[in-house]
Each structure stands twice: as C-alpha cells, then as structure tokens.
Image (cartoon, rainbow, N blue to C red):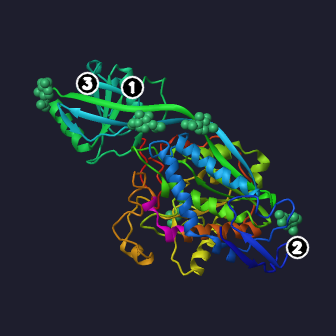
Amino acid sequence: MKIISVYVLALVGVATTQNSDLVRIGNNRGGGHGIDSHTHRKPFIVPSTFIHAVEARNLLNHANQFVKFSELSNGTRAFGSKGHNATVQYIKGLLDKTNAYTTEYQTFPYLYSEGNAAFSANGTDYTTAWFTYGPAGDVTAPLQIVAGVGCELDDYPPEVSGKIALILRGTCAFGIKTALAGAAGAAGVIIYNNAEGSIGSGTLGEVSRPELGPYVPVGSLSGTDGASLAGVITSGTQVIGKLHVNAITDTRYSSNVIATTKAGDKTNLVVAGGHTDSVAAGPICNGINDDGSGTMGLLEVALLLAEYNVTSAVRFAFWTAEEFGLVGSTHYVASLGDTERQNIALYLNFDMIASPNAGYYILDGDGSAFNSSGPAGSDHIEWTFENFFYAHKLVSAPSAFTGRSDYGPFLTVGIPSGGLFTGSDGIMTAEQAQWWSGGVAGRAFDPCHHQACDGISNLNVPYWVWNTKAAAHTIASYALSLVGIPRGPRVAVREFALTKLSHDERRHHTCGEEIFEL
Ligand SMILES: *[C@@H]1O[C@H](CO)[C@@H](O)[C@H](O)[C@H]1NC(C)=O
Ligand SMILES: *[C@@H]1O[C@H](CO)[C@@H](O)[C@H](O)[C@H]1NC(C)=O
Ligand SMILES: *[C@@H]1O[C@H](CO)[C@@H](O)[C@H](O)[C@H]1NC(C)=O
Ligand SMILES: *[C@@H]1O[C@H](CO)[C@@H](O)[C@H](O)[C@H]1NC(C)=O
Ligand SMILES: *[C@@H]1O[C@H](CO)[C@@H](O)[C@H](O)[C@H]1NC(C)=O
C-alpha cells in the first residue's frame, strides 16, 4: 500500500472545512485504516491534485481481476453470467470497504438472447448470420422464392409450406418476414441482402410477433449469394437448403451497482457511469476495453474519492446489460421518482476509454460538430473535458451525441450529459493519426471491438490513465461546483424507444453506423 501525504490548500468559494494542516491520504483498499466518515472530517477534494492519484498499476490490477471473472463463464461477462455477477460483486465489495458510500444492487430480470447460424445449399457452405430473437432449429428443405419482398401474407405461395423461404431484404422488418413465412407454413427463412455484401448483424426487432405468425429458424445471406441462388431456382432447378440455428433466449436476473457518497448534498447529484457487462458474441469476449476500461476507471476514481469531502454528492453507477440495449441505465432512469430525477444535476458516461488505436473523443454536448446537442448544461460538460485535455496539451475531438450508450436514457428525461470515448469500429484517418500519439492511420480504433481479443493486451494504458484522470478531474470539479449546469425540468418518461435494439446494433460509434432492423 502506498501512503502519500499532501497539504490541503485553502479552497476558494467552497464551504470551509476544519482543515487539519496535514492530512494523510491513503489509497486504502483494506478498510479499517481509512479516515472514518462518521468521526473524522475529510479534506475537500482538489481536482488538480486529485488526478495524480490515478495510477496505471491500480487500473491493471482491476483488469486482471476482470479477466479472472470472465473465466468463470467461458471467457465472457455477458449480463447475468457468473463472470458478470463476479464483476458486480467485486465493485460493490471494494466500495463497501471504504465506508464512504451507500451502495446498493438494483436487480431485475431481462431477456437474454444469443445465437449463431450455419447454412449450406446443395452441399455448398455459405456465410450466414443469426438474427437476434431468431429461434433455434435444424431445417433441410428445398428453397422457395416468394413474391415481392415478403412483407404481405399474399407474397407467400402455397408451395412455401414445409420449405425454406428465400426472401429479399427491404421494405419491412426482418421479424415481419420471418413471422409471415411461419404463418404460411415455411419451415425456415433465408433473408438475402438487397446490396452485394452481407447484411451484417440483424435483429427480428421483437421477441415474438404472435399477431402475424410464429418465428421459424432464420439466417441471412449476402446479396451476391442470395441473388445467385434465386437465379438458379428461377431457372427451374431445385436447390436443397440446410439451415442450422443455435440460439438461447431466456430470462436472466442481473444487477446495476449504485454507490452514492455519504458526503455531499443529495439534492445535487453528480452521476457517473459505465457498463459492467461484455457482449456474449463468440466463445470469448472479456470486454476489457468495452467496457471494462470505463468501469474500472470509474471504480478507481470512486475508491480515490472516498478519502475526500465533496459539496454535491457523487453517485457512481455501474450498469448491467448495456450491450443488450442500454438495459441497466434505462431501467434505472425509468425507475426514478420525480424528486430523484430532479435531484440529478448531470450524468457523465465512460464507455470504451482505452482503445488500442485510441483518440481522445468527447461527446459533442454543444452540438457544434454534429448538430445534435443535449439538454442545456451538456455544452458545459463538453467544455470541461475539453479544457482538461487542452491544459495537458492533448488533442481532443468531438464524438457524435447519438445517445447510443448509457447516457441515452438520461438525455431522454432532460438531464445534461457528456462523456469520453476512444473509438471503436471506425477507421483512424491520416489526420487523426497525427493528432494522437501512437495512432495508426487506416486501422480501426479498436480492431478487437466485440471480439475475443478484447483482453488485457487490447488496453491502451497511457490513454486509459489520461481518460481516467479526465474523469477524476471532471467528477471532482462538478462535485465542488455546479455553476454552468442549469436544472431544467425533467420529463417523466417510462417508454424508451432504444431498448429493443440488439447489442450489435448498439455499437458505440464516432460517426453513425447503420442499424439493421429492416
Ligand atoms: C464535509 O463538509 C461539510 C461542510 O463543511 C461538513 O458539514 C461535513 O461534516 C464534512 N464531511 C466530512 C466527511 O468531512
Ligand atoms: C461454456 O461452453 C460450453 C461449450 O460451448 C457450454 O456447454 C457451457 O454451457 C458454457 N458454460 C457457460 C457457463 O456458459
Ligand atoms: C447472477 O445474479 C443474479 C442476481 O442476484 C442471480 O439471480 C443469478 O442467479 C446469478 N447468476 C449466476 C449465473 O450466478
Ligand atoms: C441440387 O440438388 C438437387 C437434388 O439432389 C438437384 O435436383 C439439383 O439439380 C441440384 N441443384 C443444383 C443447382 O446443383
Ligand atoms: C441542425 O439541426 C436543426 C434541427 O434538427 C436543423 O433545423 C438545421 O437545419 C440543422 N443544421 C445543419 C447545418 O444541418
């Protein structure tokens, strides 16, 4: 354990503390040795010196733990798995030991869905993909073309019964085509793209559509492959398709961890969050950058903050099931009472802050770059982050304020928001590679995004440390003063439009990616 000593400086504009002149600040992880929150006064936080306590080795210690947790469930920390549960227990356990937080689990059920597909036609294998909510099954049957794009029951001829319907993408949702084919008696469905390449990740959009018909096993094909098979069938030759879909869809319980400083005004809450779950795609996905990095950075800030007093209370939120559609944060925001919602001054999000080919992205809360701004105060949050990077001679750039991470539900109810991000599937340009040290032009910001290789070696430690310092500085600044953050009226929202999207649709981005529900 490292003990550092600092002098507490008189703070301008902050309520006076009974400063002892010399205060020992311990990064105490064992408990029982820290400054007791009930009997001892703590020094008020000083943002500029607070950031020095952020250290790479403490972050990496958390990362080693997270990898061990993922080993409990085949290398993933998907929500509700053993690896995910171990992650939330670790976070709550460490925060409880500080005695500086009131912590709670917010536990609730959500539908988990995971799968993959394989397809061959007359013995030749094709590249195919599973659709979220698609049922499991094995079908071997002739392929049958349908009329139009299969959006009307009339498009399905009687011959489709018992066969695999081959349907062109477009006009209506994948889920509508699949249910109508099921209603017409098809044994399976292949949807092929209306452009050359593959459809990518798609979803049936809804868990079921009983009003239209039953879902049947369904896979996708590229436009090239689908059109060529359709051509063969149209010429009168039979093609036997073999579709194999593995899928599980079940209800799982998992938890958000919510930790609020005992110190500080609870009617002026500074909320900061990141997500604890990884995707389940593939056999292994540690999710160490996405979003281990944001979660561990916040955990570290919370542990360090435990030694200080604050003006406004700080609430750290560790969200479950972000990868399934911002589920944990949406559940939290939707469950807020009117007073609690009004008491939240702002929300800060940290999702992917250590990408291997990183950029310093700040959510564009003022809308200056992407013409999409947040509630008043979001501009101030962006500037606070910008000033931090500028002061440390680091180049930052705005990232589109899309609402596609856990700040989305906060925006929906009118809470000013902001956050950091180091890039995911986007490709770094030559210009950006000049801005960001170590940057490689032409390569994705995170080539391991949502893949097995998102482990310890995927972490960009220097960027991680700087982003964690930026988080520490910003959280500490707002914990001292909320000047610049107006408290507009909050909207009571119970229905959140985004929640139906699958994890792949909800990829984090810098420059809008496509969403495939149609
Ligand atoms: C924090 O500061 C306030 C205002 O000065 C004081 O009432 C409170 O006791 C302090 N709390 C701690 C834990 O130091
Ligand atoms: C791990 O993978 C094996 C084989 O794919 C599977 O049978 C098992 O259910 C998985 N276990 C967990 C906890 O996901
Ligand atoms: C994970 O935690 C939830 C909530 O406490 C519990 O219901 C579930 O059974 C746990 N899952 C596993 C795999 O341990
Ligand atoms: C596919 O196999 C069927 C049944 O064996 C055969 O009738 C048909 O000609 C084959 N089609 C092609 C395109 O080879
Ligand atoms: C920015 O968005 C507003 C409102 O959506 C729109 O009216 C305006 O034309 C947009 N401006 C630009 C430059 O795209």
Residue depicted at 45% across the width and 75% down the height: 436
Q: Is label 2 within 8 A of ligand 1 (CB to nearest ligand atom)? A: yes
**In the picture provided, is 242 more to the left or to the right than 503?**
left
CA separation in Å, label 2 and label 1 = 72 Å
Label located before the other in sequence (1 or 3)? 3
Is residue 301 among what the camera can see? Answer: yes
User: Is disc 2 in contact with disc 1, using a CB cutoff of under 8 Å?
Assistant: no
Q: Secondary structure at mark 1?
A: helix
At horizontal 40% and vertical 72% (from top left) the residue drawn is 439
Residue 109 percent location from the top left of the image: 60, 35
Q: Which residue is mark 1?
A: 180
Please report the bounds of the magenta region as a residue range.
456-464
Element under label 3?
strand
Compared across the picture, whether 427 is left or right of 12 comes to left
Residue 18: mark in rendering: 2
In the displayed structure, would residue 167 be above or below residue 255?
Answer: above
